[in-house]
Image (cartoon, rainbow, N blue to C red):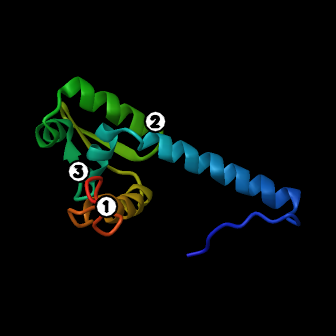
Amino acid sequence: MNTPVITEDMSTEDMDKMMASACDASALLKAISHEGRLMILCALVTGEKSVTELEELLHARQAAVSQQLARLRMEGLVTPRREGKAIFYSLADDRPRRILEVIYEMFCSMPAEGIDGGATAETA
């Protein structure tokens, strides 16, 4: 994986491309920066779910789930599919899955002691 580097001798064109990419990344991060939206994306990693299934899985009201799905849909992170009266959602592409893998690794799979190797507020 390449880490971006800004240098003094970057061309204006390269800097503009990097800024456009930063704007795209910022929009994506804003879209997933809500715990409800993150939980919906986590639920969809395993496959398509109906709004009712998401409500039950997340123990959330239909209005809250629908509001968060609307934002995720607007940002192009999920796609809807209608089947009769039911609407099913799935991840639009691999971006959410890849980000969730990193988030999971950083925040969910750490030992109970915490990220800093075991020091807690009481022991530090």
Question: What amino acid is labelled 1 in the image?
Answer: Tyr
Q: Residue at x 27, y 52 (%)?
A: 42
Estimate the spatial distance between the alpha carbons at disc 2 and disc 1, rounded to whole Å. 24 Å
Q: Residue at x 28, y 67 (%)?
A: 118
10 Å crowding of disc 3: few (<14), some (14-19), many (20+): some
Estimate the spatial distance between the alpha carbons at disc 3 and disc 2, rounded to whole Å. 18 Å
Q: Residue at x 33, y 59 (%)?
A: 124
Query: Residue 116, position in %: x, y?
Result: 36, 65
Q: Secondary structure at mark 3?
A: helix
Residue for badge 1: 104
Question: What amino acid is labelled 2 in the image?
Answer: Met
Question: Count of labels shown?
Answer: 3
Residue for badge 2: 74
* Residue 61 location, quadrant: top left
Residue for badge 3: 43
* Residue 57 location, quadrant: top left
Callout 3 touching callout 1 (CB < 8 Å): no
